Amino acid sequence: MLKDRFGRTHDYLRISLTDHCNFRCTYCMPQEDMQWMPHSRLMNAEELVRLAEIFVGQGIKKIRLTGGEPLVRKDFSKILESLSKLPVELTLTTNGVLIHHYIQDLKQAGVRSVNVSLDTLNPEKFRKLTRRDQFEQVWENIQLLIDEGFRVKINAVALHGLIEDELTGFIKLTENLPIHVRFIEFMPFQGNHWESKKVITAAEMLSLASKEFEFEKLYDEPHATAKKYKVSGYEGTFAFITTMSEHFCGDCNRLRLTADGKIKNCLFGSQELDLLGLLRKGEDVIPTIQQSVASKHAALGGQFSADYQKADPEKIQNRSMIKIGG
Ligand code: SAM
Ligand code: SF4
């Protein structure tokens, strides 16, 4: 069991399949000097599955595949099939633009829930945010996932000045669609030009939403990252991921494996320990996994305080989000 010094048991692993992506979201990837990792540095399918097996042996019960964009990996179906043989719940976070090619593979692998990122319902704004003109395809694919019976969560990064016009539209979507929209507070990563004034908090969004809707607070499961709400009578739900205004580190059960095979014990942590290097040398990786868990900080990777307004993005040592795997 992977228990840290604060008594938190880690049973959820997020694996980044690649740092490559077919979108260019401004809040996620560095706007200058983006260098893709060479393929030789990425875990190949066998290495990735072997490391996943070792993690499962250590008590991991849920694996989320992410990236970069996980679906740009040519061997995605092969990886998915191999991972589906492990005794874990498998899930996926994707920008959604390629998902129509993988519906049957996902079903066969037993994936029941998919997170799709969509920050705006306006095609023109979508083009500006992602630097790709693919709104229609993503929207069609969200409908397809719903029709095919997947539980669909929409991840919308909430940027001050942009999300205000979108809140009503997104919440209205939940009236007749069984979808779960989650507004994520904007987080600081290398090169993403984060400033505290670009953060809009859950409290501010709730106050805006309450002008239009009557809603109730729903129960949040243990380890949940999202605080859930529902407009009475609506089919779906909406939620806030309050990393900046009210972190949920006290209950964290998550570890990350980057596409180049480094274990990160926290999204915001600077520590990375190289599992792939050890695996390639034929060495035991388990002591290093345990070392990573043992050295996890109490909150926010030990890099900034709970008052996000005091965070200095220049001082945060971390990768860009696209290279970590959200
Ligand atoms: N490409 C996939 C996608 O877009 O869903 C998976 C990887 S992406 C890094 C995972 C999630 O991180 C997405 O929902 C994205 O919106 C979110 N994300 C990226 N940068 C972020 C930031 N600076 N603050 C908050 N969320 C962010
Ligand atoms: Fe790519 Fe996802 Fe980052 Fe957008 S949020 S650039 S789709 S990895």
Image (cartoon, helix red, strand yellow):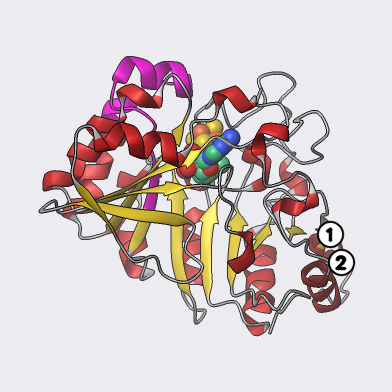
49 w.r.t. 186: above or below: below
Residue corresponding to mark 2: 278
Disc 1 residue crowd, few under 14, some 14–19, many 20+, Cα 10 Å: some
Residue corresponding to mark 1: 274
Q: Please name the amino acid that badge 1 sits on.
A: Asp
- Nearer the observer, disc 2 or disc 1? 1
Q: Is residue 270 visible?
A: yes
- The reply, left or right, for residue 324 in relation to residue 153 is right
Q: Residue at x 37, y 41 (%)?
A: 96
Q: Residue at x 48, y 78 (%)?
A: 85
- Contact between marks 2 and 1 (CB within 8 A): the answer is yes
* Residue 250, x across and y down, in percent: 63, 65
Indicate if the residue with disc 2 has its beta carbon within 8 Å of ligand 1. no
CA gap, disc 2 and disc 1: 7 Å
User: Nearest the camera: 212 or 179?
Assistant: 212
Bounds of the magenta span? 115-137
Q: Residue at x 67, y 26 (%)?
A: 30
Q: Residue at x 20, y 60 (%)?
A: 149
105 w.r.t. 9: above or below: above
Disc 2 residue crowd, few under 14, some 14–19, many 20+, Cα 10 Å: some
Q: Is residue 72 visible?
A: no
* Residue 147, x across and y down, in percent: 16, 53
